[in-house]
Amino acid sequence: MANPGAQIIGIDIASKSIELAQKRLEYNKITNPTEFYCIPIEELPTIGHTFDYINCDDVLYLLSDPVAGLQAMGAVLNPDGMIRVNMQSSLQRASFFRMQEFFKCLGCLEGVPSEEEMALTRETRLALHDWVVTKRQT
């Protein structure tokens, strides 16, 4: 780990993602102080922390207002802090966007997905033939 002893604070809108992050910490024997919050990124300022470093992967392109997400991170960033953002292009994510649009047509993915919606998306993706490009890329 690049910063032994650093406090790790994670946020995600999906509790399953938080559970996975906690399991990864355990698996990798990372014992740093940690806190996790199940909140949208726009609510980051409500947790009462400031940050020296924020790593934001695969989030902004999913937001209806990416600027609000950036503003929330900027509001809690220390003056000499750094934000690292992974900006996916629409071309790289075309298969994901197609799948998201498909599930939106079914009435899924409006807000935080329910357990049933997540199960439906998994089952649908697994049911696709292996030669289907969308399955291979997602």
Image (cartoon, rainbow, N blue to C red):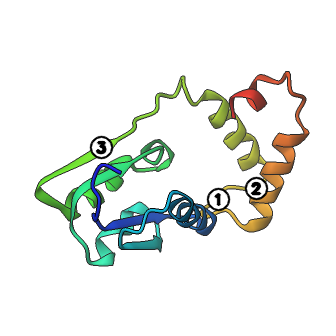
Q: In the displayed structure, would residue 25 be above or below residue 104?
A: below
Give, as a three-letter code, the residue at label 1: Glu
Q: Which mark is residue 36?
A: none
Q: Is residue 10 left or right of residue 91?
A: left
Q: In this view, does 18 lie to the left or right of 39?
A: right
- Looking at marks 1 and 3 on the same chain, the residue that comes earlier in the sequence is marked by 3
The C terminus, quarter of image: top right
Give, as a three-letter code, the residue at label 3: Arg
Tell me the residue that label 3 is attached to.
Answer: 84
Q: In the displayed structure, would residue 31 be above or below residue 55?
A: below
Give the secondary structure at mark 3. Answer: strand
Residue 39 placement (x, y as % from top left):
47, 70
Q: Is residue 112 left or right of residue 50?
A: right
Within the image, what quadrant is residue 31 found in?
bottom left
Point 45% across, 73% down: residue: 37
**Marks 3 and 2, how far apart at CA:** 33 Å
- Looking at marks 3 and 2 on the same chain, the residue that comes earlier in the sequence is marked by 3
Give the secondary structure at mark 2. Answer: loop
Binning the other alpha carbons within 10 Å of mark 1 as few (below 14), some (14 to 19) or many (20 upward) gives: few
Give, as a three-letter code, the residue at label 2: Gly
Point 61% across, 28% down: residue: 94
Tell me the residue that label 2 is attached to.
Answer: 107
Tell me the residue that label 1 is attached to.
Answer: 110
In front of the other: 65 or 120: 120
Point 29% across, 54% down: residue: 54
**Marks 1 and 3, how far apart at CA:** 27 Å
Binning the other alpha carbons within 10 Å of mark 3 as few (below 14), some (14 to 19) or many (20 upward) gives: few
